[in-house]
């Protein structure tokens, strides 16, 4: 690990000001000389591997703003402070009651130790675990723009089949983000140009020909909160995660589902897919396929077909299409059968 300057700003404006001193207008957060750290469960790993090499590290854990550490429940929804830990949110009674899909997505992620350390904002900004990204001797357009993508012709079992491009097929490995994009969450951020709200669906960017541009954030912007709107029928929701082993493993395929039902007929469906896409993936075509339909195995299967209609597999990950479809069908039927 290369040397760096470590600072602990005590308020958001100071943290933004320090980061702004080292940022240019075209800097990406992942490539900036000054980077933020909270739990450190992702960034510290990549610093040790030489993938991330910031000159300045800004530890946000001393920020004095109390709301950063609070879960605020109102009639309008739930607001998570950016520094709330994953484990705290997973255990919160109102999160479990109102949005079981969120609690599930957090509880099924990582390990208990990591969940107690990792912040919610840091979790949604985690970078890929692509083996070719993590190993600096391999070509990776996300790590070194224009260098190529070794995963294309390498062993790509873990890689994405949705949202891919000719430049990158790295999977987004988070779980929490799938629940947030399904529920139309909003991110609050503060930077050099003030505060703003970002629809969660616009936070992450598909790779296209610039896979190193991972989010819509500026280099000096800090996520301050994540807000989930009130959706009474979101009590009928769950997150299903399929992986090689039952704990401490990333999803091969996952589905976040919330359903508004009139008997067995779908009034509205919210669906997001994980483990199969380059970014948190809202399955809008699957939602449309279910609208007004009786939810049974046939309609769930048709929705799954719609969700993966645009999939682009590589040599070793084609199985993810069928696995992803079966995961979604199972998630839909289990959500239908929930007692709420």
Image: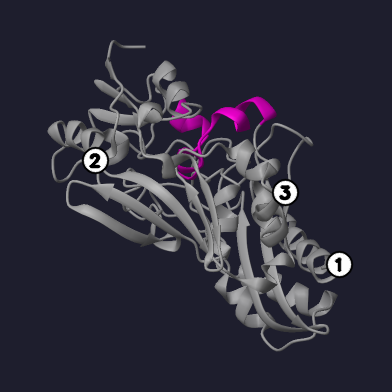
Residue at left offset 61%, top offset 81%: 288
| Residue nearer the viewer, 337 or 73 | 73
Judged by depth in the image, the label closer to the viewer, 3 or 1, is 1
Q: Give the image location of residue 45, x and y in percent.
A: 47, 22
In the image, is residue 112 part of the stretch drawn in magenta? yes
The circle drawn on residue 339 is 1
Q: Position of residue 281 (x, y in %)?
A: 54, 60
Q: Tell me the magenta residue range.
A: 111-135
Q: Secondary structure at mark 1?
A: loop
Looking at the image, how many numbered discs can be counted on the residues?
Answer: 3
Which one is in front in this view, the residue at disc 2 or the one at disc 1? 1
Query: Which class describes the residues within 10 Å of circle 1: few (<14), some (14-19), or many (20+)?
Result: few
Q: Are marks 2 and 3 in contact (CB under 8 Å)?
A: no
Residue 4, disc: none
Give neighbour class at mark 2: few <14, some 14-19, many 20+ (Cα, 10 Å): many
User: Is 271 part of what is drawn in magenta?
Assistant: no
- Up-down: is 269 above or below 123? below
Q: Which residue is mark 3?
A: 241
**Judging from the image, what secondary structure is the residue with disc 3 in?**
strand
| Image position of 171 (left or right of 255) | left
């Amino acid at each position: 690990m290369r040397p760096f300057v470590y600072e602990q700003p005590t308020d958001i404006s100071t943290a933004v000001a320090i980061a702004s001193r080292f940022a240019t207008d075209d800097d990406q957060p992942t490539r900036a000389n000054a980077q933020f750290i909270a739990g450190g469960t992702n960034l510290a790993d990549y610093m040790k591997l030489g993938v991330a090499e910031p000159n300045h590290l800004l530890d946000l854990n001393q920020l004095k703003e109390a709301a950063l550490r609070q879960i605020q429940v109102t009639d309008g929804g739930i607001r998570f402070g950016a520094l709330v830990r994953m484990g705290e949110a997973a255990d919160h009674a109102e999160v479990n009651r109102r949005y079981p899909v969120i609690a599930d997505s957090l509880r099924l992620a990582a390990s208990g130790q990591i969940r107690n350390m990792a912040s919610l904002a840091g979790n949604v900004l985690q970078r890929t675990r692509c083996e070719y990204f993590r190993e600096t001797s391999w070509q990776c357009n996300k790590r070194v723009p224009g260098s190529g993508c070794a995963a294309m012709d390498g062993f790509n079992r873990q890689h994405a089949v949705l949202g891919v491009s000719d430049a990158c097929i790295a999977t987004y490995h988070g779980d929490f983000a799938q629940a947030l994009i399904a529920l139309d969450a909003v991110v609050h951020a503060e930077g050099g140009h003030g505060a703003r709200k970002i629809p969660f669906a616009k936070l992450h960017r598909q790779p296209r020909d610039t896979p190193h541009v991972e989010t819509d954030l500026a280099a000096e912007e800090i996520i301050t909160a994540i807000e989930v709107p009130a959706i009474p029928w979101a009590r009928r929701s769950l997150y299903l995660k399929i992986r090689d082993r039952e704990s401490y493993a990333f999803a091969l395929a996952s589905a976040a589902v919330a359903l508004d039902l009139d008997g067995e007929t779908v009034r509205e469906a919210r669906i997001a897919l994980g483990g199969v896409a380059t970014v948190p993936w809202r399955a809008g075509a699957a939602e449309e396929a279910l609208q007004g339909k009786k939810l049974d195995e046939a309609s769930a299967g048709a929705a799954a077909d719609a969700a993966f209609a645009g999939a682009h597999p590589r040599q070793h990950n084609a199985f993810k299409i069928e696995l992803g479809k079966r995961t979604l069908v199972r998630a839909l039927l289990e959500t239908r059968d929930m007692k709420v």
